[in-house]
Amino acid sequence: MTADAEYPTAPDRGALVADDQVAAQVYLDPDIYEEELERIFYRTWNCVGHESEFPEPGSFKTLEIGRRPVIVSRDRKGRINVLLNRCRHRGALLCEKPSGAMTSGFTCPYHSWSYALDGRLRGIPYPEGYPEDIDKSRLGLQRLRVETYAGLVFAHFDEDAAPLHDYLGAARGWIDLFMKQGAGYPLKVQGAFKFRHRANWKIQLENVTDGYHFPLVHRSWMANVDAETAEMLSFMKDPRAVTYGLDNGHSVGIFVPEHVDLGEDDGTEPLQERFASLVADLAPDLPPRDVRRLVRSLHGAGFNLTIFPNLALSMGFIRLLNPVAVDATDNAHIALGYEGGPEGANRERLRIHEHFQGPFGFGTPDDSDVWDRVQRGAVADPGMAILLDRGLNREQTSDEGHPWSHITDETGMRTAYTMWKRLMTDVH
Ligand code: FES
Ligand code: FE
């Protein structure tokens, strides 16, 4: 037997992805899911939230990156830490609370080893069972590398990873535009809807810049909103509504061209009638220009931005995904508002979020249903292609070298799978 025969080489995952399609196996194969955790989620920058979720020392939340539980905490010095949620003694999960505030640290429920907010080991009960000179500095919680951009907090398991700034690349300019929906106020998180849907994570990732499904899957939402809002999202024949594939699998899809840069306002766009009473409430306290700025920002920025692999900045909210199994994905739909802004405007933003993203909303339940159907339908034949060729007949390349086409085309998905293929076939 040759050495090669004894040790079969790993399957070539690159063969599953072509320029215009992928094999349905990428949604279905548990081995591929395991490789994705190792090669994608544990080797790229994952977004873990927004700085406003950790307003003061002692604020924290817990979540998972792949199967790895982590704690995000703000420490006494004001720094944000991302720590493995796993006791250094015998491995117990330290913290089960989804989030909290004013905590002084984390104490393991098993033998009460206690850790500071930055992960340092503070105390060991009955220490006489250990040498007097035990080096506690070597027994702190495992720390992830943390970097932030425009208030978004990202973590990486690899201390030597390339900087977040480089990883985001051209998406940085779009993140800057997204943050302009603060209308002069810092953005803050107002709450989140969390749910699990029964489909592979990539089906949801594909959906973020999929303008094609919007008027079809979201017919009931379009029928339920006022005519002005429905008109605002009628982009099917608008040549300005385009998708760009960006660096490293990121992509952006423009749904409302006049709201791409909310800092620009020539004063000609009429404010929607549905916000008339809010305008009346705001008018006594704010100059007309500021009222316009706030009201025009209520629906969020005019685009959806995918940051590969787990973040979407989707008009007015932040979406984090986490793949919990080959056929199950956890989602957090994080609502945004104006820190220190008018209460009425924050309330209006929450109502808009609930109306589409909420469990009884008109958007997300429809989306989750079709994602679930893709998973169940794809089972029919793992070798059969998932088609990603829509718009190849009209795709162009920008001066910066980015492919672009109409928002109803599949440019964003092709960009994401190019990155997927790179990560799944790179020799590490
Ligand atoms: Fe945490 Fe023992 S497992 S203190
Ligand atoms: Fe949708």
Image (tube, rainbow, N blue to C red):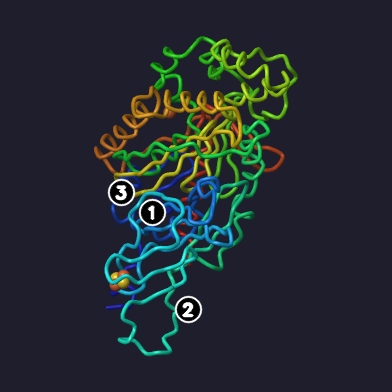
> Mark 3 and mark 1: span between their CA atoms?
15 Å
Question: Left or right of 186: which side holds 205?
Answer: left
Can residue 89 be seen here? The reply is: yes
Name the kind of residue labelled 2 in the image: Ser
N-term-proximal mark, 3 vs 2: 2
| Of labels 3 and 1, the one closer to you | 1
- The mark found on residue 326 in the picture is 3
The N terminus lies in quadrant:
bottom left
Q: From the Cβ of disc 1, is ligand 1 less than 8 Å away?
A: no
Residue indicated by mark 2: 137
Are the two marked residues, 3 and 2, in contact with CB atoms closer than 8 angstroms? Answer: no
Can residue 394 be seen here? The reply is: no
- The mark found on residue 334 in the picture is none
Q: Is residue 377 above or below residue 45?
A: above
Could you say whether the residue bearing mark 1 is in a helix, strand or loop? strand
Q: Residues within 10 Å of mark 3 (few under 14, many from 20)?
A: many
Viewer-nearest residue: 31 or 54: 54
N-term-proximal mark, 3 vs 1: 1
| Of labels 2 and 1, the one closer to you | 2
N-term-proximal mark, 2 vs 1: 1
Residue 44 coordinates in the image, percent (x, y): 50, 57
- For the point 47% across and 78% down, the residue is 137
Q: Is residue 204 above or below residue 263?
A: below
Residue 89 coordinates in the image, percent (x, y): 33, 74
Residue indicated by mark 1: 64
Which quarter of the frame holds ligand 2?
top left
Question: Left or right of 65: which side holds 147?
Answer: right
Q: Residue 374 falls in which quadrant of the image? A: top left
